[in-house]
Image: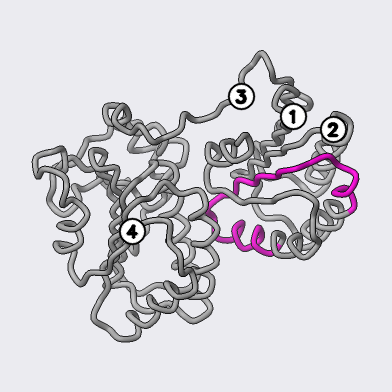
Amino acid sequence: MKTLQPAHGQPEKQLNTHTANALTNSAETEYLTFCFLPAAKCLEARWHRPVSSKEYKQGIRSIAVCIATLRAKMLLIDFTMMGTPTIADQNWTASFLKEVMKHSLLRYCARVLSTDEAQLFAHEVVVDKVHNFPYISQVFTSEQEAKAWLFKDMPAADGLNERIAIPFNFNLKELRKLNLQPHAASDTQNPTPVTDKADTVSIEYRTDYVEIKIDKKKSLLSLRWLRPPQSREYRYSMLKAARAVLEHKLEIMLLINYKLGVLTLADQSWVVHTTTNIANRANLKKLAIVASPDSLQQTMSDSICSKLECMNLPYTLQYFLTEDEARMWLLA
């Protein structure tokens, strides 16, 4: 594994060997790097070269996952070396941002762009399509200007030199374990993560590939994939969950798809058809789906979601990047 290097020469928080190894689950990808400043709750993301459409979408999703998992309040994102996204990717970005911004805690965003007219125009296209950002954003031509704006109300010595470099191929479970507790006390706006309580939750079904839990007190069913299932396993588990929702008249449902993998086209069509048939018989009011940042799974999720949206389902469906956000929305 590559040694984690200090970001831009600044002192960096040292990760122990176990955490560093766990954070990097494959060879590092050099086109995008991350750095987190705990004192400012600020995520820095830097693109290092022009990227393909697949790399671009994977990078944007990874930035969103970091923001959600680390509960970042500030974002500095440097696009100067990235090039210009295609028109299709500009439209995708606008749609993606509209969805993830509904749940973001972000308050300030500094975007550093090159002076290339094509990149500047692409940025304006995305901004016009999104229109109302729930945070304050500014465009800059240098990181120095961006940092001066982001940190204008913070003393220079107020912990801004403490940085945590995060590998691009981070492990989500280990990302949550980063030792950020010393700064959590001042973060009064962060809601407490919602977790299952053993005394109200019963395990309806568990195998080596799926776990289905029911919390009757919260009228919640949660389904967590433990590994990618075979087609037969996937359909059996989804039907079992659907029967439980109907039998117990449950109102909210959580699907945790981090380890689901990518469904076959036949299974994608099956789940759309089955969901539509069951929807009007259920008492469901909210369905939250937590998707992996993997680009293939995201493409699959987008396809299924767009088909379901055309079916006028009698409940609200939302996709999330983290489980905590999904639970907070379900129980709100």
Mark 2 = which residue?
Answer: 249
Mark 1 = which residue?
Answer: 219
Residue 303 position in % (x across, y down): 69, 64
Query: Seen in the image, is 24 located left or right of residue 141?
Result: right
Query: Reading the chain from its start, which is encountered first: label 2 or label 4?
Result: 4
In the image, residue 184 above or below residue 43: above
Query: Seen in the image, is 10 located left or right of residue 287?
Result: left
Dividing the picture into quadrants, the one containing residue 142 is bottom left
Classed neighbour count for the residue bearing mark 1: other residues with Cα under 10 Å, few (<14), some (14–19), many (≥20): some
In the image, residue 93 above or below residue 159: below
Look at label 1 and name its amino acid.
Ser
Classed neighbour count for the residue bearing mark 3: other residues with Cα under 10 Å, few (<14), some (14–19), many (≥20): few
Nearest the eye: 139 or 88: 139
The local secondary structure at tag 2 comes to: loop
The residue stretch that appears in magenta: 277-303
Look at label 2 and name its amino acid.
Lys
Mark 3 = which residue?
Answer: 196
Mark 4 = which residue?
Answer: 136
